[in-house]
């Protein structure tokens, strides 16, 4: 048995992730009226709803969180929403990508102008399709931002004002065709500006993952925000997260128009970001819209289940980001040796489906990757002006010059002290790097434990390193219930940094949303909700499937 198991049952016979079969959602069957089950959580506060949801949606060694009893892949919800009866603008398919090497980011060249070409580049490199895969008659799209199960619950809206070649107003981005669908016109003479707005369609994830889907939607949004920050950096732009309440986001994106969504899946308002192409602060959002147009497409005509708890936690977590924090540390990442064009890294990034289980990650690549997770001047952390609250714990398998075992990378001094206090008393906390806040907790073989904790998936043990992303949890949520979303966003951002840094170095990463929550906490010795694991991520040398045909993204 693996030395790190600590009471976690390691069953080497479990080679594949089992589908959850026991669910508590409302099943919709032909000829039976849909109904909403009574809410079993009669709780008085938003924070209590969130804590109850998080506990309820944990995976356990003997059972998974409530999910669908069956999946019909032929009936998967449409991964592409479009709006009918709108004016459309076909964005340029062939646009010049800035010729910037990965190791030159962030670049100091002049900002690109606000025009249709630069907007097209921004969308292609952040939320657009990067390739199609085909096998045995099935075809599916890959995008610049990874998603749980490749289900992509995040929808993108563009608010353009004075952007050359783009009509002033609100547009929906249809990534399938790389077009803008105009939803509304501006009611005023706009000050030039460009904004991206994001929403989540929970059913895309809930169709497969049941009640745990809300977590995955928020992790996905973190990946999207990080992807936007990298794409903007290539254009010489900065990204500003707007501190808007959920109702304000809904109003600006037209998501509060409930009649428009009658009979189709609703969209949950998430966040709006401003793209700053100058040294000044971004312009104010247009105040109002005229002449809304369009009807959103139906994604799933025959939904089989409902999961009322998702709407409950969504309602409990609506709110605004806290104000930006001053005086945050500005650490410079260790240099990268990758001279690959940054646009190529973004467009070629893939989520690994398997690792070879043999390759040893070079020490320089390992240290560079870890340094990029620390707060400082990088595209992602320049966008996120908040103290770090998510901290990697590493299960190291095969890293040059690093002993296998359990390590922690607290991203702040306060977190280092708090984690040390909360984790197992027998952990060593020995400094493991002369420059990075990397600490060896326990030297031991970690592969079997990583596999078991990650829902018995081989990819967690065949990697060179698997990371558990541990969030400061109870205190932020009790202070501001919307922090439940924001902690997942920060976690997804960390995952996106990992996947791009791995790709740039010739390796590959993959997110692992399925893990046994309490087993994670047992390994670490976390006895309460002061800290919670929100995500696993693995890095290794990929094994590609030669049977899969790769097709160009928009070569039609």
Image (cartoon, rainbow, N blue to C red):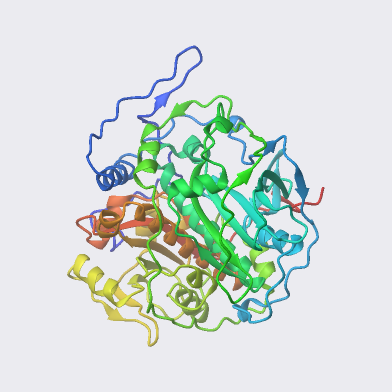
Query: In the image, residue 153 lies at what x, y percent?
Result: 54, 44
At 63% across and 53% down in the image, what residue appears?
A: 158
Given residues 89 and 123, the one toward you in this image is 89
Res 32 → quadrant? top left
Query: Which image quadrant: the N terminus?
Result: bottom left
Counting labels gives 0
Residue 258 seen: yes
Horizontal side, residue 104 vs residue 388: left or right: right
At 40% across and 45% down in the image, what residue appears?
A: 14
Horizontal side, residue 317 vs residue 103: left or right: left
Query: In the image, residue 465 lies at what x, y percent?
Result: 44, 67
Give the farthest residue toward the top.
31
Give the farthest residue toward the bottom.
434
Vertical position of residue 297 compared to residue 246: above or below: above
Horizontal side, residue 495 vs residue 432: left or right: right
Given residues 263 and 422, the one toward you in this image is 263
Query: In the image, residue 315 lies at what x, y percent?
Result: 37, 41
Res 309 → quadrant? top left
Vertical position of residue 509 compared to residue 16: above or below: below
Horizontal side, residue 510 vs residue 156: left or right: left
Vertical position of residue 220 compared to residue 347: above or below: above
Residue 461 seen: no
Query: In the image, residue 205 lies at what x, y percent?
Result: 49, 41
Give the farthest residue toward the front.
188
Given residues 452 and 239, the one toward you in this image is 239
């Amino acid at each position: 048995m693996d030395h790190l198991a600590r009471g976690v049952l390691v069953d080497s016979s479990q080679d594949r992730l089992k589908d959850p079969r026991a669910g508590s959602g409302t099943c919709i069957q032909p000829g039976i009226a849909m109904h909403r089950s009574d809410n079993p959580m009669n709780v008085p506060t938003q924070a209590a709803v969130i804590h109850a949801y998080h506990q309820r949606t944990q995976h356990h060694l003997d059972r998974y969180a409530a999910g669908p009893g069956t999946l019909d892949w032929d009936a998967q919800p449409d991964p592409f929403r479009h709006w009918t009866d709108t004016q459309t603008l076909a964005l340029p398919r062939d646009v010049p990508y800035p010729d910037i090497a990965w190791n030159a980011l962030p670049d100091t060249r002049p900002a690109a102008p606000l025009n249709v070409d630069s907007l097209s580049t921004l969308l292609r490199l952040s939320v657009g399709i990067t390739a199609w895969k085909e096998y045995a008659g099935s075809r599916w799209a890959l995008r610049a931002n990874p998603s749980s199960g490749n289900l992509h619950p995040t929808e993108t809206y563009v608010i353009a004002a004075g952007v050359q070649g783009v009509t002033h107003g609100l547009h929906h981005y249809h990534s399938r065709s790389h077009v803008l669908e105009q939803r509304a016109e501006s009611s005023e003479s706009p000050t030039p500006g460009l904004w991206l707005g994001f929403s989540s369609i929970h059913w895309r994830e809930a169709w497969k993952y049941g009640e745990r889907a809300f977590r995955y939607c928020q992790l996905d949004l973190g990946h999207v925000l990080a992807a936007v920050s990298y794409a903007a950096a290539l254009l010489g732009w900065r990204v500003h997260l707007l501190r808007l309440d959920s109702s304000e986001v809904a109003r600006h994106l037209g998501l509060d128009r409930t009649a428009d969504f009658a009979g189709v899946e609703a969209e949950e308002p998430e966040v709006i970001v401003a793209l700053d192409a100058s040294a000044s602060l971004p312009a104010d959002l247009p105040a109002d819209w005229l002449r809304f147009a369009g009807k959103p497409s139906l994604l799933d005509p025959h939904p089989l289940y409902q999961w009322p708890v998702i709407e409950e936690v969504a309602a409990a977590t609506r709110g605004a980001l806290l104000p930006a924090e001053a005086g945050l540390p500005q650490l410079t990442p260790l240099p990268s040796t990758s001279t690959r064009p940054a646009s190529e890294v973004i467009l070629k990034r893939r989520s690994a489906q398997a690792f070879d289980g043999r390759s040893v990650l070079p020490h320089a690549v390992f240290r560079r990757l870890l340094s990029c997770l620390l707060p400082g001047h990088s595209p992602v952390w320049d966008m996120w002006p908040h103290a770090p609250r998510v901290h990697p714990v590493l299960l190291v398998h095969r890293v040059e010059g690093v002993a296998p075992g359990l390590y922690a990378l607290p991203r702040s001094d306060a977190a280092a002290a708090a984690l040390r206090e909360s984790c197992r008393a027998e952990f060593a906390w020995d400094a493991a790097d002369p420059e990075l806040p990397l600490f060896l907790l326990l030297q031991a073989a970690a592969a079997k434990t990583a596999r078991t904790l990650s829902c018995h998936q081989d990819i967690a043990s065949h990697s060179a390193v698997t990371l558990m992303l541990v969030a400061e949890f109870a205190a932020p949520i009790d202070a501001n219930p919307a922090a439940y979303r924001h902690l997942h966003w920060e976690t997804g951002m960390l995952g996106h940094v990992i996947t791009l840094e791995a790709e740039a170095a010739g390796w590959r990463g993959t997110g692992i949303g399925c893990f046994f929550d309490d087993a994670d906490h047992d390994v670490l010795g976390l006895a309460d909700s002061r800290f919670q694991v929100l995500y696993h991520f693995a890095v290794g040398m990929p094994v590609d499937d030669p049977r899969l045909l790769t097709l160009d993204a928009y070569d039609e």
